[in-house]
Image: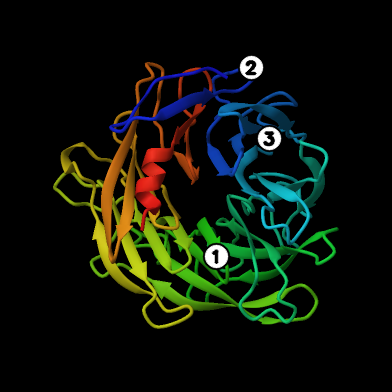
Amino acid sequence: MATIGLIWVTSAVSQATFTGDVPFVGDNFGRSVAIEGNIAVVGAPGDDENGAEAGAAYVYTRSGGNWSLLQKIAGTEVGAQFGFSVAVELDESGLNEGDFIAVGSLFGDGQVANSGTVTMFRRQDPSPTFAFQQTLSAGDGRSFDEFGYAIDLDLSIPSNSLGNDPVYTLVVGAPDWNERGLDAGAIYICALSPDGTAWACYDKMVPDDIGGGDLLGRAVSISGDDILAGATGWPSGNHPDGVVYIMRRFNDTGAGFFNWEVNNTLKPSDGVLGDRFGASVAIFGLSLAVGSEAAAATQFGAEGAVYLFENPIGPGTFNERGKILPPDLANSLNFGSQVVIDRTLMAVTDRNGVGQVHFYSARGVDWVPIEVLSVADPDAGQIGNAMAFSVPNALTGDRIRTGGGAAYIVTNQVIFDAGFEN
């Protein structure tokens, strides 16, 4: 791990760069990132340690203010692209035992060859590292469904739980699932059994209006009882507008699983063909944000935008409350390709040049810009192809950086204090 300069307006910053153990062009290190507490995970789906594009996931830990490599988990299937997506959920509540990492393999051999898989790794005291627990795949999968293209993990107590027990939930996007037409897409919902021994994918969500080319599952986010799922190709993949579906958890079955239903859809009030609304989605509690990465704000086009939604009525009901445009329209590209929310702080990526990450803080119904992150790395390709943060650390991927990709991590208590002060 090397140290590198990052530019912030504020002070009190420490930063570092993660790269692969043997960096090689095409590793795509930084294609996916996840962070929670003192654990950070970086996916490198092009890693060749166990064969061409078998992939890998690197796990880092922070101690005494310094980050170091905890372990490298190498994929075992040639061409599976293990590490295409990653997620982490730490048990910091004491309610359940174990910390989990999920790693998606885009073309992993599930119940059907090349259909895609998600592999679960678990850490249990006193071991500091994560050990293999189980590999998940779709029971109705077909080759090249891309099960695991996008994933997210959540640990929460369902609002209607019979036993008031916390539940680990994994949401998986499979955008190339094609039972409704080529590349229609689907969302799979998986959960950990109450005894903690096994995961099961027990529900699949395909809204009635999904059809060929809609690509449902290119982006997913879960918070408590709600899942957001983007379908950037809707309707039918032809110069798509894009749509986001809200799926809500209800009805405890009493067996550790819950029923889910499509509760609502989100569409921009001023969306037009080609916007790719739903390219990124983020939810935290009652705050929702959706990236529309190809939205055109000027004659140049594809500057991008982020739409904001709020919940003024009750569970599952969200109304559009605003839209954020990139602050510099003349120098913006795909603003909103990644968006992340944690409490009252939001991060939005911009792919122009070597890329930037814009931070916003919620002030009532408004989001106020508070910081911009850019990179002073001469080898940088384009930061922001992946983004995650967990107080007080921000992590962003640059999969095309010279040498096989990189991930930049910044620790800045000032910005997070500003974001969470209200």
Q: Residue at x 47, y 75 (%)?
A: 209
Q: Amino acid at mark 3?
A: Gly
Q: Amino acid at mark 1?
A: Gly
| Disc assigned to residue 181 | 1
Q: CA distance from mark 2 to mark 3?
A: 19 Å
Between circles 3 and 1, the one closer to the viewer is 3
User: For the residue carrying disc 3, how many other residues have a C-alpha within 10 Å: few (<14), some (14-19), or many (20+)?
Assistant: many
Residue pointed to by mark 3: 79
**Quick check: 50 above or below 283?**
above
- CB atoms of marks 2 and 3 within 8 Å: no
Q: CA distance from mark 3 to mark 1?
A: 25 Å
Q: Earlier in the sequence, mark 3 or mark 1?
A: 3
Q: Left or right: 360 with respect to 409?
A: left
Q: Amino acid at mark 2?
A: Val
Residue pointed to by mark 2: 22
SS at mark 2 in the image: loop
**Could you say where residue 276 lies in the image, as x and y percent from the top left?**
36, 56
User: For the residue carrying disc 2, how many other residues have a C-alpha within 10 Å: few (<14), some (14-19), or many (20+)?
Assistant: few
**Could you say where residue 227 lies in the image, as x and y percent from the top left?**
54, 66
**Could you say where residue 8 lies in the image, as x and y percent from the top left?**
32, 31
Q: Earlier in the sequence, mark 2 or mark 1?
A: 2
SS at mark 3 in the image: loop
